[in-house]
């Protein structure tokens, strides 16, 4: 696949400086999408929830962005993104780790809220970094950012779905579910 001439300077800038924020955007999207895509199946199989129960368990996913979006932005302005992005990754990893363990439904729903907080502390800040580094090509930088984001969402869903039968939660058997999806 050939890149359009307009993207070449943008990508060369990052490669020359050994910094590629698009790789971080992709990996962040793979992780968050991979976990979130399969949460409905997780709650159905582990806790026996139906559609309404799954919806209520996932309701916390939107809360941090709604309530904490502006404070997270102010913290990024005050302390910089270099502290918040790793903290967001750590919070999300901790939340995913909690979901692996045998915990109560309330704890699992709270872990989903923490997972959302981790996403809200990473993705918007990474988008800001990409746009700022894009300089006069901010629109192109954001376009490439969104492409990597949605590619990561698709890859995350596919990779985590393929990995579910390999281990993690013994009470979740997804081989037949994966066969039905594929």
Image (cartoon, grey):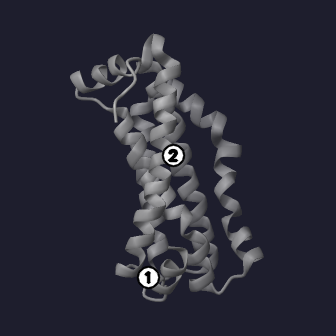
Image quadrant of residue 181?
bottom right
Residue at the spot 38% in from the left edge and 72% down from the top edge: 163
Q: Nearer the viewer, residue 46 or 95?
A: 46
Q: Is residue 62 above or below residue 108?
A: above
At label 1, counting other C-alpha atoms closer than 10 Å, the crowd grade (few under 14, some 14-19, many 20 or more) is: some
| Residue indicated by mark 2 | 150
Instruction: Give me the C-alpha separation between circle 1 and circle 2.
Output: 27 Å
Q: Is residue 179 above or below residue 139?
A: below
Residue at the spot 64% in from the left edge and 74% down from the top edge: 106
Is 148 on the left or on the right of 111, as rendered?
Answer: left
Residue at the spot 54% in from the left edge and 80% down from the top edge: 180
Q: Is residue 144 above or below residue 24?
A: above
| Residue indicated by mark 1 | 169
At label 2, counting other C-alpha atoms closer than 10 Å, the crowd grade (few under 14, some 14-19, many 20 or more) is: some
Residue at the spot 38% in from the left edge and 35% down from the top edge: 22
Residue 114 point in image, percent of width and height: 55, 58
Disc marking residue 44:
none
Residue 33 point in image, percent of width and height: 51, 57
Image quadrant of residue 30?
bottom left
Element type where label 1 sits in the image: loop
**Mark 1 touches mark 2? (CB < 8 Å):** no
Q: Nearer the viewer, residue 19 or 109?
A: 19
* Nearer-N-terminus badge (1/2): 2
User: Which of the two discs, 1 and 2, sits closer to the camera?
Assistant: 2
Q: How many marks?
A: 2
Residue projecting furthest to the top = 136
């Amino acid at each position: 696949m050939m890149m359009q001439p307009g993207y070449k300077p943008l990508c060369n800038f990052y490669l020359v400086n050994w910094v590629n924020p698009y790789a971080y955007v992709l990996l962040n999207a793979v992780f968050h999408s991979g976990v979130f895509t399969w949460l409905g199946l997780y709650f159905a199989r582990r806790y026996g929830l139906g559609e309404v129960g799954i919806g209520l368990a996932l309701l916390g996913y939107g809360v941090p962005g709604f309530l904490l979006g502006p404070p997270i932005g102010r913290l990024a302005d005050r302390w910089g993104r270099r502290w918040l992005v790793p903290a967001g990754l750590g919070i999300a990893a901790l939340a995913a780790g909690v979901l692996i363990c045998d915990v109560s439904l309330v704890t699992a729903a709270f872990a989903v809220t923490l997972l959302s907080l981790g996403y809200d502390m990473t993705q918007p800040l990474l988008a800001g970094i990409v746009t700022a580094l894009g300089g006069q090509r901010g629109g192109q930088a954001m376009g490439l950012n969104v492409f990597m984001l949605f590619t990561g969402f698709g890859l995350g869903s596919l990779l985590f779905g393929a990995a579910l039968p390999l281990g993690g939660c013994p009470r979740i058997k997804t081989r037949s579910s994966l066969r039905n999806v594929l």
